[in-house]
Amino acid sequence: VQASLTLPTPFPGAMSSPSHPISRKEVCGLMDVIEVSSAAQVRAFEASGAVDRLHAIPTSALPCWIRTFFKGSQFYDQERDEWFCAFEPASERTRARASYLKSKLYNEQGEPAYSTQDIQKIAMMLQLEADDAVLAEAIVNIVNRRFLGGHIPRKVILDGRKILRKIADLFNPWKYVGATEAISRVLRFCAHHLGSATRTVDLGHNIATCGTSVAEALRMVYSYRDSDLSVEDIFSAHAPAHSLLRVAVKDDVVEGQRLIPRQTVVRYDIRTIAAEVMDQDLSFTFGAGSSYRACPFKAFFVKFMKDVQSELRRGETTHEEAFAILPALHRLHQTVAYPASFACYNRMF
């Protein structure tokens, strides 16, 4: 696998040192962040028992910058004080919650709940360079329609695309206010349309993540369509998520770093680590190097991306196939940026 990674776009792991020193950022007593960028260091912190997922600490007791940032993210529902299931502590029983989320992604036969036409539609959008809004609406509905039993409107998906994605966004007041208001609207939509089986924040996370990270991942698959790289190769080198956060839950010293309970945050740079490790089970792309409580969407994501990759490698969509898919595309274009985005499928002819 390593020998096959000779590509026009450099893989981040190709120029990384096998050993990364731990760094620490402290800002006037307001922020204390330990940066970890090697697999061995991550495993040391995980095994220590001194750190846990963010909601191991009550929201009100988390560092101020964490509370502020996550109000504009897809991971926290401020109105209900609920966190996305991946942020619940190790002691929290999230298996039933994760199993329910997985069940909505598969049909009664245990197959992923998308059709061949869904795959063809996404592949054609990528080939025709559909704009981001069109691609986002398509993938959000393919993944999440079974939660609601119907179409998720464009305005909800566009709101989900306004989430905060970088800490630096905290210092842009217009972006921050816009993100917090947008995710609140997404969560209100979810609360209004969901049954009691799904937590509002879990579906809100799905909508926002599919409209941003998953849509970007599809373009990544398209960019490597002419290479012999597998989906595992691509998303080891280009993990959709950049980092995982842990918070100190007890006073301890790990890897030479003092941990202060409820104050010290440990950031795992999983994008760098995954690119170095290049493991075929994507244990760092979708988690902290272990299968324990890995992302519940991992298997679905990998299968979907492989099917899209196969469709792209099969060749350009024929006119007959395009006309079969055209009604579904037309419905999307009627609701997204018409008529500007209509141009994308004019390129066929």
Image (cartoon, helix red, strand yellow):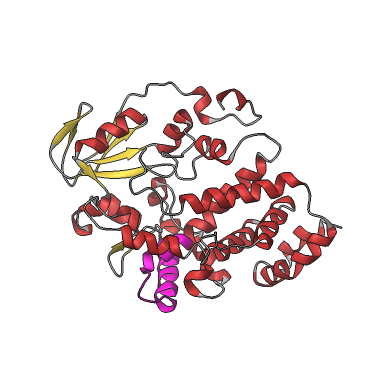
Confirm whether residue 103 shows in the render: yes
Q: Quadrant of the C terminus?
A: bottom right
Looking at the image, residue 187 lies above or below residue 84: below
Q: Residue furthest right?
A: 349
Confirm whether residue 26 shows in the render: no
Q: Position of residue 208 (x, y in %)?
A: 48, 60
Q: Nearer the viewer, residue 101 or 193?
A: 101
User: Is 300 left or right of 247, judged from the image as shown?
Assistant: right
Q: Position of residue 274 (x, y in %)?
A: 45, 34
Q: Residue at x 62, y 35 (%)?
A: 229
Residue 203 lies within the magenta run: yes
Looking at the image, residue 115 lies above or below residue 295: below
Magenta highlight range: 178-206
Q: Residue at x 71, y 37 (%)?
A: 226
Q: Residue at x 57, y 27 (%)?
A: 1
Q: Nearer the viewer, residue 326 or 137?
A: 326
